[in-house]
Amino acid sequence: MPDAAPDRNAPAAIDAKGIWKVFGRDAGAFRRLPAEARTPEALAAAGLVGAVQDATFQIGRGEVFAIMGLSGSGKSTLLRCLTRLIEPTAGEIAFNGRDVLKLGDKELVELRRQRMGMVFQHFALLPNRTVVGNVAFPLEVQGMPRPKAEARAMELIETVGLKGRETRFPAQLSGGQQQRVGIARSLTTNPEFWFLDEPFSALDPLIRADLQAEVLRLQKTQTRTVVFVTHDLDEAIRLADRIAIMEAGRIIQIGTPEELVTEPATDYVRRFVAKVPPARVVKVASIMTPDTGPSTSGVNAGATIAEIAPDLVAAEGPLPVVEGGRQIGWLDRSAALKTLAAQV
Ligand SMILES: Nc1ncnc2c1ncn2[C@@H]1O[C@H](COP(=O)(O)OP(=O)(O)OP(=O)(O)O)[C@@H](O)[C@H]1O
């Protein structure tokens, strides 16, 4: 998880209100219903599929937001609505306060080119361009001279571990390598918004872990608002500040990994997080006793109990808890050890 907590007071980078995506022959009639009449019963009566039902959430600038849920719960459809690859049936979406559903085709293309990066599975690479040609392409579209665009592309090719393969064509790459080209390509323009649908699922575990680490590293140096769909809870916990859990088209709960594990809203969420050891998500700040003190070093308030396990083992008494070089509390060793030992 990123070190710097997102600024919750800043205006939402993404503000989604009452998003619906309904599939079926008469989806238009559903749109014309007043908001209070848009119900699961109305959907069923009209024989419509409510892929996304009344999704409302805000994502802060620089926040990493994961969308999770079982297959068919509406994750991809919701992500596609945010990017307008699919037009929502109803609802409002604003990026930095600007209504994106009202953008004309030209403005939408501009927004996508200048400020959005997208990685979707089966998001085709250009078959007649090499790896470097594909990765440089978005910059060339923006008007950057080719040599400069390719130099920038090479940096990202190295980041995704494809150095040495830059002159190959997509057909000469494995599925996972193609996926990595797509990831590199989505970052060439240094987008403010990054949308990813199962970006790492086709990759070997080691490469996946490398790229996840790379995402976290990039998040520390660049303020990027990230929304990603995954069915891998481990990945969501590692990368996301907050996770939205979807069930049958609805967002059931939105929370930090710690909130989902310690306060699951429903049995469905509880089943999702059942195998997560609490120490992996519970933060020092959550179980410390607040107090000021003279210490300038100790355990970090934002660290998880698992991360500070070595300090716990070494300590003999309570540990000072610090934030920004100042002591803000004490961590009781036995309370922390209890969390460490707890299995859900
Ligand atoms: N074009 C479409 N026409 C009709 N129904 C659709 C369409 N696209 C998606 N659906 C339905 O909407 C629901 C949500 O689909 P979606 O692909 O968003 O789920 P998901 O959570 O991303 O699933 P997965 O993890 O399997 O990719 C499913 O019931 C799906 O069958």
Image (cartoon, grey):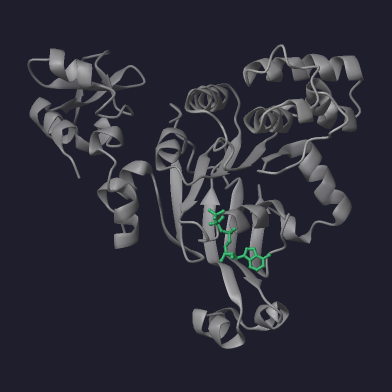
Q: Residue at x 52, y 39 (%)?
A: 64
Among all residues in the image, which is located at the extreme bottom? 45
Would you place residue 311 above or below residue 58 in this image? above
Q: Which is nearer the eye, 105 or 210?
A: 210
Q: Residue at x 61, y 78 (%)?
A: 48
Would you place residue 266 above or below residue 41 in this image? above
Would you place residue 233 above or below residue 127 in this image? below
Q: Residue at x 17, y 35 (%)?
A: 339
The answer to which quarter of the image holds residue 221 is top right
Where does residue 28 sit, x and y in percent of width and height?
A: 72, 79
Q: Is residue 83 visible?
A: yes
Name the quarter showing ligand 1: bottom right
Q: Residue at x 77, y 43 (%)?
A: 112
Does 259 sit left or right of 290 as displayed? right
Does 151 sit left or right of 39 as displayed? right
Where does residue 103 sit, x and y in percent of width and height?
A: 80, 56
Would you place residue 196 above or below residue 310 in this image? below
